Image (cartoon, rainbow, N blue to C red):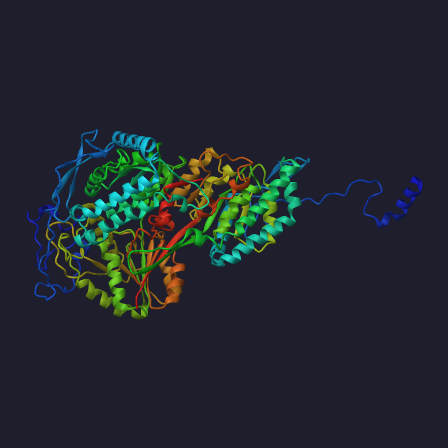
C-alpha cells in the first residue's frame, strides 16, 4: 500500500512542521489522532537541538573493501544510499557482483592461510583492541554517519549502537588468546573463511557482533552489509586500515541479496552467519544444505512484553515504550506484543497512551528525538500494509497526534487494542513502531499466549514478584528474557533465538562457539 | 553302567525337562517391535523385514511407517515438557538406572551384536563401552549449566545469567555401523540435555536398538521420552525431516546421499541440526574411547536462555 506521505512530492527543504494536519499512512488516516502532549503551545515543546554533521565527510562514491584496498565493482554498477529522514541521496555504493564476492573470498582465504592463522593469538587480540579503541576515538563520526544512513535517532546511535560496537570488539579481543577456556575438554580451531550477511536496523552493531567474535576465533571475514545502510561498514573499512589489520582479514562487499548468496554458497566459506528475516534465513539454510558449513541464524521475532497486575506501572509503561519504539520498532527483539493482565489493562493503556503522546518523532539528528525515520520506503509500505490489516481484521487502532516531518519516511507510533491472537499484527513481525495489545487473566494464560508464536527471540516480564519472574522466565520459549527491563544488550550476554527465531548465540562465551570448530 | 543309567533316565522321564530323544528345547523367540510411547506396537503398516542372523535363521524386524513416525512425534511432544521439568539430578539418576539395567541385559546385547556379525570379543567390548557411555552421560545433566552457562558481568546495573535449556523433540538418525555404542552415544546426549528422542535405528543391525527399547521400558525413563523405530531409513527420512513438530535432527547416521535432502527439510522449519563432523566416517569404531565422549551431542540440542534483571531497590 502506498504511503500518503508522498515523500517525493513534498517541499524541497525538510521542515519539522508543527501543524497537526500532517497526513499519516492510509490506515491511520481513517482514525482521528488523539491530542498530543507536545502541541506547539505545550510547555514540553523543546527547541531544536540538532547534532552537527560537520564531523562527517561522506564521499560521493564508495568502492568495495577487498584485500585491504578499495576496489571498483567488477560490473561497474552502483546503487544509491539515501538519508531516510530527508530522502537525500548520500552516496553511490558499489554494486558487488558474484565476481567481486569471489575476489573477496579469495583474499580472505589467502589472508587466513598465510597470515591470520599463523599469527600468535596474542597479536590477534591486540588488533581487536586497536579496532575497539579506534571506534571509541571516532565514535561521534560513526554515530552521525549511522543516523544519517539509517534514520535512527542520534541519541541511540550515540549511546547504544556505537559504544556497544566498540565494547564487542573489546570483549572478544580478550578471548583471542584464551580460546581453550571457551571449549573446555576440546581443542579450539578456526573455521577459516566466514561469510556474514547483516541487516539494516543496527548496521554497525551487527557488523561488530559478527566480525569481533569471528576474528577473535581466528577466522577471516567476508561481510555484506545491508543495501540500504552500507556507510558505517565502509567507514569501518577505514578503521581496519588505521588499525593496520593485515590485508584480506576483513573484506566488505556491498550489493544486493544475490551478492550475499554468492558469498554464503561459496565452497571456500566454511561458516555462515546471517541476521535478517526468517524467510531469507531459511533460504540460506536450504541452499547450503549438505555442504558441511557451520551456520548460525538470527532471525525474526514477535516478543511478548508481559505486564502483570502487580507491576510497577510507570516503569512498565517506560519499558513497553522502550520495547516497541526503540529504533522505530525496527528491532528483531522488539516487544511488539503487549500482554497485559485484564485487571489493570484499562489503567495501563491509559498511562501508555499518555506516554505515547509525549514521544517526539522527527529529525533523527535532533538529540531530543525519540523516534526517527523508518529505514526505507519499502519498509514504510510494509508497515503500512500490516497496520491496514490490523484495522481490517477488526483491531482497534490508536495513534497520538504528534507532528510528523513533511519529508522523509516517518511512521506514527501505533497502538492496537482488541487484538486477537490470530490477527496478522499479532503473528507477523511488523518491524515498525506498532504495538499489538492482548489481555490475559492468569499466569498460565500469559505464558501460553506469549509462547503462541513461531518465533522465540525475546520476551519481557513486568512484576514485582521475584518468584514469578523466575517461573515465567523459565517457561517462556525465548532466548532473551528481560525482567523489569527491556532491550538491553551487552557483549558479555549471549543473544539469540529459540524456534523460528534462529539458532546460535551472539555475545558472551557462547557467541564464540559458533566461530570455532572444536575437536 | 550305561544300561543302568539308561534305565534310570527312563524311569525319571516324567520328572525331567529333557526329552528322551535328547533333542533341544524349542527356543521362545522374541518379536522385534517398535517402541512408541512406552509401548511395543507392531508397525501399523503390518510390515516387517527379514534380517539374517549370524547364528542362523532370521529375525523379523518391524517395518516402521510414516504413520508410526507421526505417532512417535505425537507422544514425544507430550513427554517433552515433563521430562525437561525433571530436576537435572533426577535425569542423571534415570540415565544411570538405564546403565544399571543394560548391565543386566549385557548377555542379550552381546548376542544381538554377534547375530549381526560381530566377533565375541568385539561384542563384549562394545556392550561394556555402551554401558560406560551411558554412565558418562548420567553425570552430565547437573553440570551443564555450570560448564555452558553462567552469569554475565554486564556493564550496567543488571544481574544477568545464561542457562542451557533443552530444545525439545529431537529425531536421531542413529549411526549405522555402531549399532549399540553409536546409538547410546548419540541418544545419551539428547537425553542428558533434557530432550526427548525419536530414534531411527541402524537399518542393517537393528537388534541392539530393540533390546535397548526393552531395557528402557523397564527403566525409569518415562514413556514417550525415547521412541525407537526400525524402518527403511531412506523411506522415512523425507517425512521425518519435514515434520514441523520436530525441533532438531541428529543426522550423525544419515547416509551421505540423503544428507542434502535431510538438511533442506530441517531448514524449512528452522530445526537444529547436528551432523557427523567433517572427515569422520560412520564406522564401527567411531565412538570408541574418548572419541565417543563428546559434549557436542548434548550442546547441539540446547538453547541458551539469557535472563536480565535490574539491580536496585
Note whether B203 is above or below B133 in the view shown.
above
Picture coordinates of residue B47, whole percent (x, y): 58, 41
Nearer to me, B67 or B153: B153
**Residue B7, picture quadrant:** top right
Q: Which quarter of the rendered picture does the C terminus of chain B lie within?
A: bottom left
Picture coordinates of residue A283, whole percent (x, y): 34, 40
Q: Which quarter of the rendered picture does the N terminus of chain B lie within?
A: top right
Picture coordinates of residue B138, whole percent (x, y): 54, 52
Residue projecting furthest to the left: A12
Nearer to me, A56 or B26: A56
Does residue A206 show up? Answer: yes
Picture coordinates of residue B225, whole percent (x, y): 52, 52
Position of A258 compared to A11: left or right?
right
**Residue A217, picture quadrant:** top left
* Residue at left offset 13%, top offset 38%: A59
Please tell me how many numbered marks the rendered image carries. 0
Note whether A352 is above or below B49 in the view shown.
below
Amino acid at each position: 500500500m502506498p504511503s500518503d506521505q508522498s515523500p517525493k512530492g513534498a517541499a524541497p527543504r525538510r521542515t519539522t512542521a508543527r501543524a497537526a494536519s500532517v497526513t499519516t499512512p492510509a490506515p491511520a488516516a481513517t482514525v482521528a489522532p488523539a491530542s498530543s502532549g507536545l502541541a506547539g503551545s505545550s510547555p514540553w515543546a523543546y527547541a531544536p537541538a540538532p547534532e552537527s554533521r560537520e564531523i562527517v565527510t561522506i564521499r560521493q562514491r564508495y568502492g568495495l573493501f577487498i584485500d585491504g584496498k578499495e576496489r571498483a565493482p567488477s560490473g561497474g554498477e552502483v546503487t544509491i544510499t539515501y538519508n531516510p529522514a530527508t530522502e537525500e541521496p548520500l552516496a553511490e555504493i558499489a554494486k558487488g557482483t558474484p565476481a567481486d564476492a569471489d575476489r573477496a573470498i579469495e583474499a580472505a582465504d589467502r589472508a587466513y592461510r598465510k597470515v591470520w592463522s599463523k599469527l600468535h593469538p596474542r597479536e590477534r587480540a591486540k588488533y581487536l583492541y586497536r579496532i575497539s579503541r579506534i571506534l571509541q576515538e571516532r565514535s561521534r563520526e560513526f554515530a552521525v554517519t549511522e543516523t544519517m544512513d539509517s534514520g535512527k535517532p542520534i541519541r541511540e546511535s550515540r549511546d547504544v549502537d556505537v559504544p556497544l560496537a566498540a565494547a564487542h570488539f573489546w570483549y572478544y579481543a580478550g578471548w583471542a588468546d584464551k580460546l581453550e577456556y571457551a571449549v573446555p575438554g576440546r581443542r579450539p580451531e578456526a573455521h577459516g573463511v566466514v561469510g556474514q550477511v547483516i541487516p539494516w536496523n543496527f548496521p554497525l552493531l551487527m557488523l561488530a557482533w559478527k566480525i569481533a567474535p569471528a576474528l577473535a576465533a581466528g577466522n577471516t571475514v567476508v561481510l555484506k552489509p545491508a543495501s540500504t545502510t552500507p556507510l558505517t561498514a565502509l567507514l569501518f573499512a577505514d578503521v581496519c586500515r588505521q588499525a593496520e589489520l593485515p590485508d584480506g582479514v576483513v573484506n566488505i562487499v556491498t550489493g544486493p541479496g544475490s551478492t550475499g548468496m554468492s558469498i554464503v554458497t561459496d565452497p571456500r566459506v566454511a561458516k555462515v552467519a546471517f541476521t535478517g528475516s526468517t524467510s531469507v534465513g531459511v533460504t540460506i539454510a536450504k541452499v547450503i544444505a549438505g555442504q558441511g558449513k557451520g551456520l548460525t541464524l538470527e532471525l525474526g521475532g514477535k516478543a511478548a512484553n508481559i505486564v502483570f497486575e502487580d507491576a510497577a506501572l510507570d516503569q512498565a509503561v517506560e519499558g513497553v515504550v522502550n520495547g516497541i519504539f526503540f529504533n522505530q520498532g525496527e528491532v528483531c527483539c522488539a516487544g511488539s506484543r503487549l500482554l497485559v493482565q485484564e485487571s489493570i489493562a484499562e489503567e495501563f493503556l491509559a498511562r501508555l497512551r499518555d506516554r505515547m503522546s509525549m514521544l517526539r518523532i522527527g529529525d533523527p539528528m535532533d538529540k531530543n528525538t525519540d523516534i526517527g525515520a523508518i529505514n526505507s520506503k519499502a519498509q514504510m509500505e510494509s508497515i503500512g500494509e500490516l497496520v491496514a490489516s490490523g484495522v481490517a481484521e477488526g483491531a482497534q487502532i490508536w495513534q497520538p497526534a504528534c507532528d510528523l516531518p513533511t519529508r522523509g519516511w516517518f511512521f506514527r507510533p501505533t497502538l492496537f487494542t482488541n487484538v486477537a491472537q490470530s490477527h496478522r499484527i499479532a503473528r507477523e513481525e511488523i518491524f515498525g513502531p506498532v504495538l499489538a495489545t492482548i489481555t490475559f487473566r492468569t499466569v498460565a494464560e500469559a505464558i501460553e499466549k506469549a509462547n503462541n508464536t513461531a518465533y522465540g527471540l525475546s520476551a519481557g516480564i513486568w512484576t514485582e514478584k521475584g518468584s514469578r519472574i523466575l517461573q515465567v522466565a523459565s517457561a517462556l520459549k525465548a532466548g532473551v528474557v528481560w525482567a523489569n527491563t527491556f532491550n538491553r544488550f551487552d557483549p558479555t550476554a549471549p543473544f539469540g533465538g529459540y524456534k523460528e527465531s534462529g539458532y546460535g548465540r551472539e555475545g558472551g562465551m557462547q557467541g564464540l562457539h559458533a566461530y570455532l570448530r572444536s575437536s | 553302567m550305561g544300561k543302568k543309567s539308561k534305565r534310570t533316565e527312563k524311569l525319571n522321564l516324567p520328572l525331567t525337562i529333557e526329552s528322551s530323544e535328547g533333542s533341544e528345547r524349542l527356543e521362545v523367540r522374541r518379536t522385534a517391535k517398535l517402541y512408541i510411547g512406552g509401548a511395543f506396537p507392531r508397525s501399523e503398516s503390518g510390515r516387517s523385514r527379514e534380517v539374517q542372523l549370524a547364528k542362523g535363521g532370521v529375525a523379523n524386524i518391524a517395518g516402521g511407517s510414516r504413520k508410526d513416525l507421526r505417532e512417535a512425534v505425537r507422544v514425544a511432544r507430550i513427554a517433552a515438557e515433563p521430562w525437561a521439568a525433571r530436576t537435572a539430578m533426577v535425569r542423571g539418576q534415570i540415565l544411570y538406572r538405564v546403565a544399571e539395567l543394560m548391565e543386566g541385559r549385557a548377555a542379550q546385547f552381546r548376542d544381538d551384536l554377534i547375530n549381526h556379525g560381530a566377533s565375541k570379543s568385539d561384542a563384549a567390548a562394545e556392550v561394556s563401552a555402551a554401558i560406560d557411555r551411558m554412565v558418562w552421560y548420567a553425570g552430565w545433566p547437573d553440570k551443564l549449566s555450570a560448564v555452558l552457562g553462567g552469569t554475565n558481568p554486564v556493564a550496567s546495573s543488571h544481574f544477568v545469567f545464561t542457562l542451557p535449556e533443552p530444545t525439545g523433540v529431537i529425531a536421531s538418525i542413529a549411526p549405522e555401523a555402531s549399532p549399540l555404542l553409536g546409538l547410546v552415544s548419540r541418544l545419551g546426549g539428547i537425553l542428558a540435555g533434557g530432550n526427548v528422542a525419536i530414534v531411527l535405528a541402524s537399518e542393517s543391525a537393528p537388534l541392539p536398538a530393540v533390546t535397548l527399547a526393552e531395557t528402557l521400558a523397564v527403566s525409569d525413563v518415562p514413556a514417550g521420552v525415547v521412541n525407537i523405530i526400525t524402518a527403511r531409513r531412506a523411506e522415512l527420512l523425507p517425512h521425518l525431516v519435514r515434520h514441523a513438530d520436530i525441533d532438531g535432527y541428529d543426522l550423525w547416521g544419515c547416509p551421505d546421499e540423503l544428507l542434502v535432502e535431510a538438511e533442506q527439510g530441517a531448514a524449512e522449519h528452522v530445526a537444529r541440526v547436528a551432523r557427523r563432523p567433517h572427515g569422520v566416517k560412520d564406522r564401527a569404531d567411531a565412538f570408541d574411547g574418548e572419541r565417543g565422549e563428546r559434549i557436542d551431542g548434548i550442546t547441539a540440542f540446547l538453547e541458551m536462555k539469557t535472563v536480565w534483571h535490574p539491580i536496585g531497590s
